[in-house]
Image (spheres, helix red, strand yellow):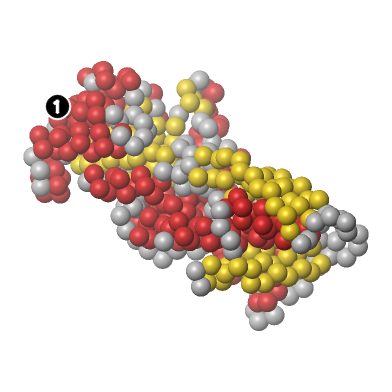
Amino acid sequence: MKKIGMTDATLQEMILREKGAVGFKEKIEIVRMLDKIRIDVIQIPFPADEKVNELLIKTVAPLVRHSFLCCNGGLAAASIDSAWKAMKDARKPMLRIGLPVSAIRMEYGLGRKPLQVLELIAQLVDRAASHTKDVDFVAEDATTAEWGFLCETAKTAVKAGASVFTIEDSAGTMLPPEFGAFIERLRFDVPELSGVQLGVCFNNRFRMSEAACLAAVDQGADVIRVSTGGQIAAGMETMADIIEQRGESIGLTSGLAHTQVQQAAVRIRQLATGSVQGKEREYESTSGVRIGALLLKEGDSLQTVGKAAKDLGYDLSAEERKKVYEAFQRLVHKKEIGAKELEAIIANEAIQVPPTYQLKSYVINNGNLIRSTAHIILEKTNGKATSVEGFAVGDGPIEAAFRAIEQIVGRHFELDEFQIQAVTEGREAMGDTLVKLRAGGKLYSGKGISTDIIGAGISAYLSAVNKIVFEENVS
């Protein structure tokens, strides 16, 4: 069985479709959904030399756990360096260099002659390869290039350090057998490609992309480009269905989490367009009445709201569900809450900054005859995860725990407010804590919830600290 790789181009497709209204948080959530379904490569098409794009890349880099994060290196060494600086904390970073290779676009788009373009390819790929071994060179409009020049392009990119060489049929006018023959001939004429992965992208202008990509895979392609919209590339859902239903008979498999692909694609389209394509989901109110489209009303329970969020594709923690429900309760007496309103609540209340520090364990010693001590171990994510620990003494377990965290972080924070309240009743009551820290003249809040009030306090303190560290790193 041959495992076929998939590169997602949904964010690029959104740009070309002029979906400029898609916000910062929506883009983050799209990346998280793609990573969740185990897509092989997530393509970030935005140049990192713009501040907002740099912030986006820095934000998503530590969130992506399974996929390669592939950023656009641009057309200059400085832009490649900027992209790498923004994404270097990703677990699997990849740089993408894309250049036109047809005579017309080289002349009028780049303003360069063929030999100059080959020199530029060598320079840019070499610069990218100095940062990472995973470099994807994309030969744009390759199917309209002069054959001899295309072969030289492939040889130059591979020699300079490209690990993936991608062929684009930007026009999407080739028939699938023609595209398969094109890939077969390229493999034969450029033996250097045997040492790297060969990627393909076929514009879905005439709805032939999936068939063309399968024809290319049959002739030696290793990676295909997909998107949830299925316009500039093969449709992700369609390719996933083909491999799931016919993979064994055609000798293909993929790393996709097939059972989650359809739900993720629907969710991503909703984020991109504000509407859900396909079947309406049903939701159940506390009264047990099933309704076709999502419609939450005053009196709906935490469980009902949590289920609605889960059906929309969100995997919220207990703390995040509580935040969303509190916001829901503040709004629902004013109007009924539909899918769009619930999306806004989740975006505002549940999506957090990527944590630099996460709690691994804590041990507290406390009593009426001794001063409280705290031994805390955190996991710090800074390129790679490392364990760091702190030990401190304080007037009470909470103060000792906070001082141990400050020892780990290496700085003191001014505690502006600390609140504790019970959110459930009984011996196993849940404790809800609020911590407000002051740094640089600004106030940062964190919340924690646990049956252990000390654990809730530590979680709240770390939440505020992570916000401070994140804002300082991107400023």
Query: In which quadrant is the C terminus drawn?
Result: bottom left
**On screen, residue 421 above or below 334:** above
The residue furthest bottom is 334
Residue for point 34% across, 40% down: 95
Label 1 environment density (alpha carbons within 10 Å; few <14, some 14–19, many ≥20)? few
Give the quarter of the image for residue 304. Answer: bottom right
Q: Is residue 241 left or right of residue 20?
A: right
Q: Is residue 415 left or right of residue 439?
A: right
Say which of 138 and 396 sits in front.
396
Residue for point 45% across, 56% down: 473
Q: Position of residue 158 (x, y in %)?
A: 26, 27
Q: Is residue 96 left or right of residue 245?
A: left
Secondary structure, mark 1, is helix
Residue for point 15% across, 34% down: 118
Q: How many marks?
A: 1
Q: Position of residue 312 (x, y in %)?
A: 61, 56
Say which of 269 and 166 sits in front.
166
**On screen, residue 299 above or below 274:** below
The amino acid at mark 1 is Gly
Q: Position of residue 188 (x, y in %)?
A: 25, 18
Give the quarter of the image for residue 369. Answer: bottom right
Q: Is residue 162 visible?
A: yes
Residue for point 85% across, 61% down: 429
Say which of 154 and 257 sits in front.
154
Reading the image, the residue beneath label 1 is: 148
Q: Position of residue 142 (x, y in %)?
A: 23, 36
The residue furthest right is 427
